[in-house]
Image (cartoon, grey):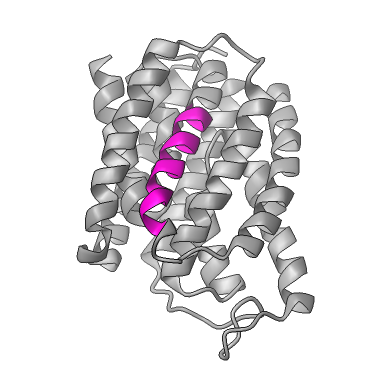
Amino acid sequence: MTAALGLGTVIGILLGLLGGGGSILAVPALVYGAGLPLSAAVPTSLLVVGISSATALLPRLRAGQIRWRIAGIVGAAGAAAAFAGAAVNRLLDPRVVLIGFAGLMVAAALRMLRDQGEAGGDCALPGGGVNWRGCLPKSIGAGIAVGFLTGLFGVGGGFLIIPALVLLLGLPMPAAVGTSLVIIVINSAAGFAAHSGDATLDYRIAGAFTVAAIIGSLAAARFASRVPARHLSRAFAYLVMVIAAFVAIQAAINPPAN
């Protein structure tokens, strides 16, 4: 229980600061920190990430940092794809899932370590408008990719959504963070629905993890604008790579229960 509280707080802090990222740590934290089987860790992760992301979203509602139409399109496409990802998850050995997850973590970390400036795009034209002819297919494509990974690995996908919103759709970073949280909530809800019948959840651990994540996300959201985002992102990337190595080694020598 103590591990669940501590790890939940860390994940909430990352969600509050970065608008994503914490979810990529939730599954290994629940499997290796809280001792849950993978079949229970995936829906528990989605429950925790969805609720804590909704909480982290609250301070940004007043700031007007959310592109609701884009969030709805990406989220709807992702919700449908999450069920396909969950179906593939059930066909794979837990060891394969965790090793694949470790590979995804490394890819995400390498992306965060690269200097990437904000770029314009169809979804955020210089005059403030949106070219839906170009924005719509990009939004749907991004949603399908992230939603599938949400269902497959039990992640909210913020570490993939934010670069997609900034680099592919052209949203400024503040809008990308707020919009990302809305999409994470939608994807997490769909992924949880897809996985909810796979295992009996330990609601004591899920509750402790969720409460700690909520507190961490609320506290971090208040200080998000004061923290150098680039330095924080790099530190988090190195942490993700270390955890990815740990997950891969553990999956290879000590296969998790399904």
- Residue at 69% across, 27% down: 194
User: In this rendering, is residue 165 above or below 15?
Assistant: below
Left or right of residue 18, residue 70 in this image: right
- Residue at 59% across, 30% down: 97
Q: Quadrant of residue 237?
A: bottom left
User: In this rendering, is residue 147 above or below 108?
Assistant: above
Magenta span: predominant SS is helix
Magenta stretch: residue 48 in it? yes
Whether residue 152 is visible, yes or no, is no
x, y (%) of residue 224? 27, 59
Whether residue 26 is visible, yes or no, is yes
- Identity of the residue furthest to the front in this view: 62
Left or right of residue 52, residue 255 in this image: right
Left or right of residue 151, residue 55 in this image: left
Q: Quadrant of the N terminus?
A: top left
x, y (%) of residue 155? 53, 39
User: In this rendering, is residue 208 above or below 102?
Assistant: above
- Residue at 61% across, 80% down: 121
Left or right of residue 183, residue 147 in this image: right
Highlighted magenta segment, given as a residue range: 45-60
Q: Quadrant of residue 174?
A: bottom left
- Identity of the residue furthest to the bottom in this view: 127
Q: Quadrant of the C terminus?
A: top right
Q: Nearer the viewer, residue 17 or 247?
A: 17
Magenta stretch: residue 204 in it? no
x, y (%) of residue 134? 75, 77
x, y (%) of residue 234? 30, 60
Q: Nearer the viewer, residue 251 or 115?
A: 115
Q: How many marks?
A: 0
